[in-house]
Image (cartoon, helix red, strand yellow):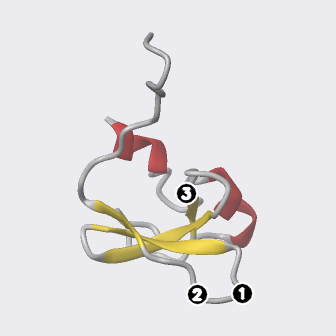
Amino acid sequence: MAGNETTTKTRPIDIIWLDPLPNHDHRIVLFKGKTIGFSPLDSDEIRLTSCYKCKKENYALAVMDGVCAWCGWSVEELDQ
């Protein structure tokens, strides 16, 4: 690899990270125009708060995993 090249995880164009609000440590994440969660400023990981597939609010303890507690949909499916 050349000196200034970096490897980054590519995501589909349908994902939008909104600019963080002042004094906040995260960004809101949209997928195909719908809010699905948030992402910490120091990471590109998506925390799933609202499932894109079943449209339900995610169970609080499953948010950090990025997997819907109700239908099993995962933000990792966005990378495929």
> Which labelled disc corresponds to residue 46?
3
Does the CB distance between marks 1 and 3 fall below 8 Å?
no
Front one among 66 and 15: 15
**What is the distance, in whole Å, between disc 1 and disc 3 at their CAs?**
19 Å
Q: Return the disc, 1 or 3, that comes first in the chain's sequence.
A: 1
State the SS at label 3.
loop
Amino acid identity at mark 1: Asn
Which quarter of the picture shows residue 63?
A: bottom right
Q: Which mark is residue 23?
A: 1
Vertical relation: 79 (above or below) 74: above
List x then y, in percent, for residue 57. Answer: 53, 77
Q: CA distance from mark 1 to mark 2?
A: 6 Å
Vertical side of 53 occupied by 66: above or below: above
> Looking at the picture, which amino acid does disc 2 mark?
Leu
Q: In front here: 78 or 73?
A: 78
Q: Name the front one of labels 2 and 3.
A: 2
Q: Are marks 1 and 2 in contact (CB under 8 Å)?
A: yes
Q: Residue at x 64, y 63 (%)?
A: 41
Three-letter amino acid code at disc 3?
A: Ile
Query: Residue 10: x, y in percent?
Result: 37, 39
The quarter of the rendered structure image containing the N terminus is top left
Image location of residue 35, percent across then percent down: 41, 77
